[in-house]
Amino acid sequence: MDFGPLIKARKALESLWKSADLKGRCWGPKHNNNPYAFSNITIAVGNELVTISMDRNGRLVIHEFRKTEGTDLGERVREIIKKQELPLSERNGIG
């Protein structure tokens, strides 16, 4: 797959990248219809997060998220961390 459009998008987003609270390049495994398969650009500012991936036709796909609490995935992660007796803050965020 040609990741040229994703590389150009990352360069175009430089100002957001520099000021983001969270940023990274992630890789989603190719299985079933994983919407995050292959390379992704992830940027978060405040309570919002965007990850950009590519579809199988080489077009950029923007996935948008807002911070939320009480999710099934969050509960699964908490259970795993508690079972490992790792220190876990009861607060969401810094502090």
Image (cartoon, helix red, strand yellow):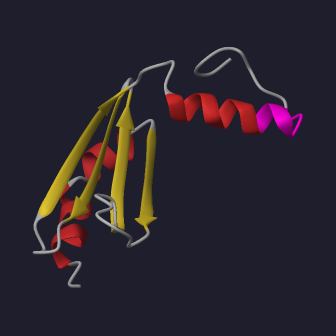
Q: Is residue 3 above or below residue 17?
A: below
Question: Residue 10 placed where, x, y %?
Answer: 26, 61
- Residue 80 left/right relative to 71: right
Q: Which quadrant: the C terminus? A: top right
Q: Residue at x 20, y 84 (%)?
A: 2
Q: Count the marks: how many? A: 0
Q: Residue at x 63, y 35 (%)?
A: 76
**Residue 12, picture quadrant:** bottom left
Question: Residue 26 placed where, x, y %?
Answer: 44, 61
- Residue 66 left/right relative to 27: left
Q: Which quadrant: the N terminus? A: bottom left
Magenta stretch: residue 26 in it? no
**Residue 40, picture quadrant:** bottom left
Q: Nearer the viewer, residue 73 or 36?
A: 73
Question: Residue 80 placed where, x, y %?
Answer: 74, 39
Q: Residue at x 89, y 34 (%)?
A: 85
Q: Is residue 71 above or below residue 1?
A: above
Question: Residue most toward the bottom?
Answer: 1
- Residue 75 left/right relative to 23: right
Magenta stretch, residue numbers: 81-86
Q: Nearer the viewer, residue 84 or 10?
A: 84
**Residue 63, picture quadrant:** top left
Q: Is residue 64 above or below residue 11?
A: above
Question: Residue 79 placed where, x, y %?
Answer: 73, 32
- Residue 87 left/right relative to 78: right
Q: Residue at x 25, y 71 (%)?
A: 7
Question: Residue most toward the front?
Answer: 32
